[in-house]
Image (cartoon, grey):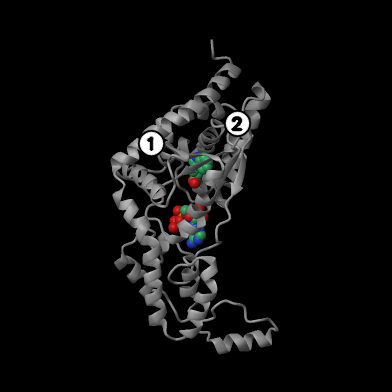
Amino acid sequence: MKKRLLTGLQSSGTLHIGNYFGALKPFLDIYEEYESFLMVADYHALTTLRDKNEMHENIINVVKDYLAVGIDPQKCVIFRQSDNQDHVELGWVFNCMVTVPFLMQAHAYKDKVAKGVEANAGLFTYPMLQAADIALYDTDVVPVGEDQRQHLEYSREAVGKFNRTFGEVLKEPKEMILSGVGVVSGTDGEKMSKSKGNIIPLFGTKEEITKAVMSIVTDSGKTMEDAIAESVATNQAVVRSIPFAKNLFSIHKLIKPDDEYNDLFDFYMANENNYKNLKMTLIEDLEAFIAPMREKREKITNEEVKEVLADGVRRAKAVSGETLGKVREAIGIAL
Ligand code: ADP
Ligand code: TRP
């Protein structure tokens, strides 16, 4: 029997290659080893989103993104939180398990309050809806980024409280912090982030890729000679990293298979100061990497997304319904 895995997807607008290597790819690498559930967290999005069209588009887009990078809906269950009412129901039960002071300690809520932003009650109880998402599927592991660690602690606490009160009905989940490639740098050498305008879009056109690569800052102020001098001074070997054109190389090596690393390294060494050539090659390689995903994404229709979600929620309900039945039995509302 495969172990169960569940994770929640929030739409984060235009994806970039940092999202791919930091979140999507690590997920892609493991999801088939488990019985996997991928849930679009649209009711969670309602805690902050107030635009009907944006909500609608985000739901469609996040599913398209996942399908385009190669997630196979036959090999996992892709569904939407709002399509399965079991989530809000168990969320309510969990709300009745935990105290207000406990929820007040949640980072997401505390941060809002610290910033003076008004927090709605949905945001306040957000961790209990997330706990329900997870507990309904007897989930073993929840692959998430480091920022979700506390939410998983809250999930375990809600499950623990329930079990201590009503008997061992629910499974305590474990977080599985995904180790991606670390931080992917953007065109300016800083962490790639959509808010910083330094991204290489994951589904970008060739023109967009070209524009992004042309804007990569190449002057690292360090030549190979500097690097060698420094290595002598610090008594360290010149590591096989590129001292010049660092920003180019760090992106380039991500999209090359490991066994081509040495060739790429040699290519850079042979092109020191020839940034034009390095950039042109990076554009070609990025295009070869991105084009198949971009083309696949363009072909996915909204209808197809709806079909995937309809099939997904049917499979999801078959599992969550059983768990919820046990919960209703345990709390005494099953007559
Ligand atoms: P952004 O910073 O562009 O707003 P998000 O915060 O929406 O990105 O991140 C979505 C996911 O992608 C998270 O799991 C995050 O860890 C990962 N991610 C985002 N940017 C990077 C990056 N530069 N390097 C590695 N992973 C990243
Ligand atoms: N809170 C998660 C995020 O912001 C999304 C999410 C909702 C989730 N439900 C979940 C993640 C269940 C893991 C499991 O990214």
The answer to whether mark 2 is within 8 Å of ligand 2 is no
* Image-quadrant location for residue 157: top right
Q: Type of residue at label 1? A: Leu
Upstream in sequence: badge 1 or badge 2: 2
Can residue 236 be seen here? yes
- Residue at 44% from the left image edge and 61% from the top image edge: 17
Instruction: Name the residue nearer the viewer: 243 or 111.
Output: 243
Q: Position of residue 302 (x, y in %)?
A: 29, 42
Q: Which mark is residue 98?
A: 2
Q: In the image, is residue 298 above or below residue 80?
A: below
Q: Nearer the viewer, residue 49 or 209?
A: 209
Judge depth for marks 1 and 2 and give the one in front: 1
Q: Is residue 291 left or right of residue 328?
A: left
Hey, what amino acid is under mark 2?
Answer: Val
**On screen, 172 above or below 185?**
above
| Observer able to see residue 107 | no
Label 1: which secondary element:
helix
Q: Residue 328 location in percent, x, y?
A: 55, 19
Queried on whether the Cβ of the residue with tag 1 lies below 8 angstroms from ligand 2, the answer reads no
Which residue is pictured at 48% across the width and 52% down the height? Answer: 24
Q: Is residue 84 left or right of residue 5?
A: left
- The N terminus: image quadrant: top right
Left or right position of 302 against 106: left
Q: Identify the image quadrant of residue 52.
A: top left
CA gap between label 1 and label 2 equals 32 Å
Name the secondary structure under disc 2. Answer: loop
> Which residue is labeled 1 in the image?
309
Expressed as whole percent of the image width and height from the top left, the position of residue 88 reads 47, 29
